[in-house]
Image (cartoon, rainbow, N blue to C red):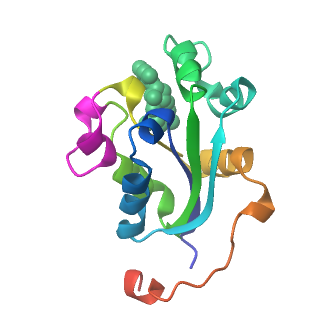
Amino acid sequence: MAELERTFVAVKPDGVQRGLVGEVISRFETRGLKLVGLKMLKVTPALAEKHYGEHKGKPFYEGLVNFITSGPVVAMVWEGKNAIALSRNVIGATNPGSAAPGTIRGDLCVDIGRNVVHGSDGPESAVREVSIFFHDGEILKEWGRNVDSWVCE
Ligand code: UDP
Ligand code: MG
């Protein structure tokens, strides 16, 4: 399946504190994506800079780094057909005020600086972010899921 992709998703510290880890995982599971990597960790300032380097110099950068390093996050790798765009749709617009109902941000949050979840925004960032947070051996590459033929043609 040529369109099979992997993407990086994280429940941010606000989502962990608010008890939304299960809810977030559930949204990706029920959409039909497959979980192939999962861990809980505290993001260090160095890791935050690596992950959010593209935003360095923007007015919200310092607050973003303070926020993402403020408590544990749950890091995940999700796999599936068109997984990157699909995940962005599950997550919703960056600013919860503009996020559609039915999306995680549209249903569960209020503020752009407390938007519960991260998802890679394209194929390059997906590869980069997965490799920042996971060693190759931590990703379960080929576990067969019996329902797959009921999710994709
Ligand atoms: N962010 C913020 N204020 C802004 C823009 C972004 O606090 O004005 C934060 C927000 O948490 C967002 C993250 O920075 O999720 C990364 O921004 P990006 O534009 O990459 O949004 P995303 O890819 O998370 O939708
Ligand atoms: Mg982004």
Viewer-nearest residue: 106 or 86: 106
Q: Quadrant of the N terminus?
A: bottom right
* Residue farthest toward the left in the current orientation of the protein: 101
Residue 86: within the magenta?
Answer: no
Q: Residue 86: x, y in percent?
A: 41, 59
What residue is shown at x 78% (from left), y 60% (from top)? 136
What residue is shown at x 65% (from left), y 45% (from top)? 129
What residue is shown at x 54% (from left), y 48% (from top)? 122
Give the magenta part as a residue range.
96-110
- Whether 38 is drawn above or below 113: the answer is below
Q: Residue 43: x, y in percent?
A: 66, 33
Left or right: residue 1 versus residue 115 is right
Q: Quadrant of the C terminus?
A: bottom left
- Whether 8 is drawn above or below 83: the answer is above
Residue 31 quadrant: bottom left
Q: Residue 59: x, y in percent?
A: 50, 10
Q: Residue 126: x, y in percent?
A: 61, 50
What residue is shown at x 44% (from left), y 86% (from top)? 147
- Whether 42 is drawn above or below 112: the answer is below
